[in-house]
Image: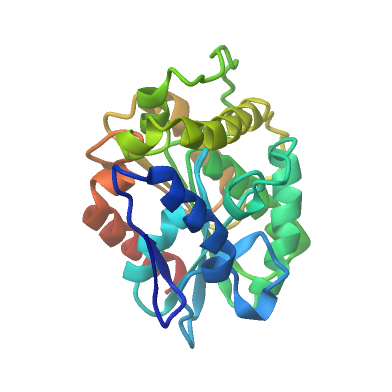
Amino acid sequence: MVDAKKSHTYRLIVTTRQPMIILNTFLERQSQYMLDPRRASDLWIRRFTAKSGGQVRLVCFPHAGGSAGFFYPLSRNLEHPYEVVAVQYPGRQDRRSEDIAGGVEELADRIFEALKPWADVSLVLLGHSMGSIIAFEVARRLESSATGTLAGLIVSARRAPAVHHEYDKSPWTMHDAQAVSEAMGGTDPVLAADRSFMELTLPVLNGDYLVDASYRYRPGPPLRCPLTLFTGDSDPFVNDEETKGWGEHTAGRFQHRRFTGGHFYLTEQRDTFYSALSEELSGFTM
């Protein structure tokens, strides 16, 4: 069931009895609680909680198969003066009628344009996994165009831009419920095993992985803003050798912070992650 609050925040409660009825209702509600009322036509940038007087806007980029709602808990826990918004990629939830983007460059171009109205305060970009490389490309566009003030970039659980892996994985199928659950950050196994859920999820997840795998780094000047790398110490998808190159992509301060946990350490160690994120944001904006 979906519980509508006066703040227009909707909470999804998944039961084991009717997961798809609940999911479909939730999907229809997405545009109602995530779209900023001042920019109702903007499908790209979602604000969960308005914080008046916020001096810094944290823009969050989700992982492959993910959505803006992944960062809803963060928006509720990050304190003033930080306001959290999140990017909603096409092809999922209330944007499920749209095609998956053609590549990272296309996504970065469109998100950069969508962010312009939000650049009235300092911006910090935070990307997780695939979202890291998209955030990096958006950061390059923000700095090269002198749009707003980019105070910092935080990348999480993703190899450095110049490190390329050939995409040799077969697409996920209906038989890969457990793998899909893990790839999407611990989706409820009951929900992941539901055929209707998988029919909605698989095209998004497979499409996003192709977007990520097709990325090729274009050499250019390093960012001027500080850059912080977050990783989990038992991440099965990335290692220190693959991530160490991030430091070459900024002329500012670079820091690498390691957490206990795997690819989704930020949900496994939520409080530790929130604390570390707050410290980084404070350092960026002092």
Where is residue 222 drawn, in percent x and y?
A: 63, 46
Look at the picture and state if 242 lies above or below 274: above
Quadrant where the image shows the C terminus: bottom left
Along the line of sight, the residue nearer the viewer: 40 or 15: 15
Where is residue 88 drawn, in percent x and y?
A: 59, 54
Residue at left offset 25%, top offset 36%: 261
- 22 displayed left or right of 213: left
Along the line of sight, the residue nearer the viewer: 135 or 20: 20
Residue at left offset 63%, top offset 49%: 89
Quadrant where the image shows the N terminus: bottom left
Number of marks present in the image shown: 0
Q: Which colour scheme is used?
A: rainbow
Along the line of sight, the residue nearer the viewer: 221 or 154: 154
Where is residue 237 drawn, in percent x and y?
A: 41, 25
- 197 displayed left or right of 94: left
Look at the picture and state if 261 lies above or below 278: above
Look at the picture and state if 31 lies above or below 267: below
Question: Residue 126, can we see it?
Answer: no
- 222 displayed left or right of 281: right
Image quadrant in which you'd find residue 111: bottom right
Where is residue 14 drawn, in percent x and y?
A: 33, 50
